[in-house]
Amino acid sequence: MVIPGAAVYGGVLVRVAVTSPVACTMRGYPTVAAELSSHRIARSGDARDGYLPGGVTASRSPLPRISVTSRLEKVSFTVQWVGGNGPTCPHITAVRFTLPGSRVTLTVRSVHEGGVGVISWFGVYCGHLQVRPVVSGLSGAAG
């Protein structure tokens, strides 16, 4: 789901269903990389919160600990970047991510945008790729 932002920000809300044959916990930040139309890769930095909704806003609170079992658990996180309309910035063509503690990297090449449908690009990328911590539920925000 694409998150609307100011003219210079873009972002996505990533929703994932997870299970594990062995009970465990997950906490922290996913590893995120954006594939760009310029054939470069942008790697994310961790951030508790930012301009777009999501994350963990209390700077001193611990990151959420999510129990993962054989039952399906829905988790989410948000990704934010500086966008723009300039011809010098490439487009994000795919987003790759690995959840904390996982060995599996998933690649997303399309996104559902409300009122539009499925689109095959994520927006213009001019820098500052940031990812929020993984949280329980589908909102991308703790609490």
Image (spheres, grey):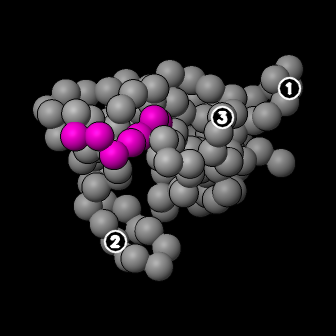
Give the residue type at disc 1: Ser
Contact flag, marks 2 and 1 (Cβ < 8 Å): no
Tag 3 or tag 1, which sits nearer the N-term?
3
Please tell me which residue is depicted at 39% across the width and 28% down the height of the picture.
127
Q: CA distance from mark 3 to mark 2?
A: 26 Å
Q: Position of residue 77 (x, y in %)?
A: 58, 45
> Depth check: 49 or 4 in front?
4
Q: Quadrant of residue 29?
A: top right
Task: Give the Cα separation between the discs numbered 1 and 3.
Answer: 16 Å
Tell me the amino acid under the disc marked 3. Gly
Name the front one of labels 1 and 3.
Answer: 3
Q: Which mark is residue 50?
A: 3
- From where the camera sits, is residue 5 visible? yes
Mark 2 neighbour class, 10 Å CA radius: few under 14, some 14 to 19, many 20 or more: few
The mark lying in front, picked from 2 and 1, is 2
Element on which disc 3 rests: loop
Q: Which residue is mark 1?
A: 61
Residue 86 lies in the magenta-colored region = yes
Magenta stretch: residue 126 in it? no
Q: Which residues are magenta?
A: 81-87
Question: Disc 2 designates what residue?
Answer: 118
Total numbered labels placed on residues in the image = 3
